[in-house]
Amino acid sequence: MSSFTSLGVPENLAAVLTADGKTEPFAIQRDTLPDSLAGRDVLGRGRTGSGKTIAFALPLVARLAGGRREPRRPRGLVLAPTRELATQIAATIAPLAAAANLTVTTVFGGVSQKPQEQALNRGVDIVVACPGRLEDLMKQGVIRLDAVQIAVLDEADHMADLGFLPGVTRILAATPQGGQRLLFSATLDRGVDALVRRFLQNEVRHEVDEESVPAGVMTHRVFVVPSDGKAALVRHLASGRGRRILFTRTKHQAKKLAKQLTAAGIPAVDLHGNLGQNARERNLAAFGAPADQGGVRVLVATDVAARGVHVDEVELVVHVDPPVEHKAYLHRSGRTARAGAEGVVVTVATPDQRREVGDLLRKAQVAAPLEQVSADDATVSSLVGAVAEHVTPTPVVAPSNGGGNGGGRGRTRSGSASGAARNADSAGGGGRGRSRGRRPAGERSAQSGERSAGSTAGGSRSGQSKARAGQAASGGRTQTTPRFTTGSTVADIQRGTRRPRRARG
C-alpha cells in the first residue's frame, strides 16, 4: 500500500495531509503524482469525487516552494469554471501552501476588484481564478502571467460547456511556453482536446476508471408521483437528518422551494446565479456548518451554481426537476458518494416524464427502476430514515409607519435559514441579486443556463407591495411571515428567539 511520501510528496506536505486524516492516496493521486512531481505535463481524467484537487495541489506547492514572490507576477495559476469551485480549491491549497511559506489568493467576478488588486500588488505565489475576471485584470495591467511556472486547468469540460475555452486559450497563451501544465477533465470533447494538443507537451495521460475510484456506493432511484403529490414527496425527502441537495432547473424555482421548505419547518438555503457572492458564501457556510452552529441540512440549487460545490457527507441528492442533459445528471449526482462515502440519488418524475427520464438514464448509463410512489409510502420513509426535528420559523414584527428602516415601509420577507431570508435584499434589493463589483462577461454567461420561470425581481416588488398593503390594513401590527435572521442558530429558532440584528450604518 503506497503512501504520499513514497510517491515523492515532501514530508512537510504529507504531514499536512496526515493531520487532515488523509493518509492513503486515491487512485488518481497514485497515478499522477510521480509524473507531476517530476515536472511532466499531465492529463488526468476522472469523475468528480476522485481526489483531483489534491492531485494537482501537491505538485503545484512542491514546485514553487522556496521561490521568491513578486508583485503582480504569480508563479502558480489554477483556472476553475465557477466561483464556488475556485474558493474551495483555494481552501484546499491554503494549508499546503502555508507549510511551504507560500501565499494563495482567489480572483473572480461578482465581488469588488480592489481586494484582489491589493493582494496581487503585495505579491502572491498562487492565484486560483475564473477566466472572466482574470482576463479583465490582465487587460488592466494588474497581473502578468509571464512568471507562471505551473498552470492547472480544472474541470476543463465544464469550461467548454460554459463557453470559456476562448478565454482559457488566451490566458494559457500568456504563460511561458516551457512551463508545466496539468489539465483535469472528465471528457475530452467540445474543444478540450484542442487545448491538450496546443498547450501540453509530451503529456502523460492517466484515466481513473469507476472501479478504481474509492469504494463509495451511489444508489439511483426514480420516484414517479402524480403532479399534485410532488410537493409533498419533495418535502418528505428533504426532512431527513443528513445533508441533502435538491436540484431545480431555474433560479426562481430554487429560491421558491428554499422558502417553502423553511416555512414548513425544514430550514433550507438556496444557491443560484441571482445571488451575490456574499450571499452565496453565507449560504454555503450555513450548509456546511453543524446544526448547533446555525447550519442547515438542505441546499436547493441550480446546475450552474452547484457544479463546483464540494461538501462532505451529503447523503442524498434529489433531482426535483430532471435535468435536460445526461451530463448534468451525472454532475448533480456527483455531489454525493464522494471519496469513498455512500449516497442516494433520487429523481422525482411525473407520469408524463417517464419516457424522458428513461432516455436520460440510458444516456447516463445508469440503471434505476421507475417506482410509483406517494409521499407517505413506506418505500420513501425507509429511504429518508429518521426525520429531523422541525424548526418553527419566528414571526417578524413589522415597524410602524414612520419608524424602522426605509421610513416605515414595513416590508416583510420570508426566506431560508441562517440569513438566506435576507440574501436578495443584501445582494442589491428586490431579489435581483446584484453584487458589488462588476462581473466579467465570461462569468455572466455561466448563468445563462439558469433561465428563471418569470421575473424574480418583479415578483419581489409585488411581494413588497402586498406586504405594505397588509401592514396598512393591520395598522402596523405584527406580521406572521416566517423569517430567520443572520446569526440565528437552529437552537435560537427552536426557542423562538433571534440574535439582535446589527444596526445598518
Image (cartoon, helix red, strand yellow):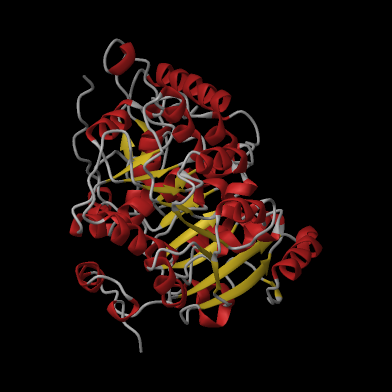
- Quadrant containing the N terminus is bottom left
- Residue 7: x and y in percent read 34, 78
Residue 32 shows in this picture: yes
- 434 to 368, vertically: above or below: above
Q: Is residue 466 left or right of residue 289?
A: right
Where the C terminus falls, by quadrant?
Answer: top left
- Residue at image location 46% in from the left, 62% down from the top: 244
Question: Would you identify the image quadrant in which residue 19 lies?
Answer: bottom left
The residue positioned 57% from the left and 78% from the top of the image is 210
Which one is in front, 492 or 100?
100
Determine whether 420 is above or below 468 in the image.
below
Q: Nearer the viewer, residue 4 or 296?
A: 4
Residue 388 on image: x %, y %: 37, 65
Q: Is residue 25 left or right of residue 466?
A: left
Estimate the x, y position of residue 228 in percent, counting from the top left: 68, 54
Q: Which of the pair 479/431 is nearer the observer? A: 431
Along the viewing direction, whichever of 282 and 448 lies nearer the viewer: 448
Residue 57 higher or lower than 486, as above or below: below
The residue under the point 71% across, 77% down is 369
Identity of the residue drawn at 29% across and 18% down: 405
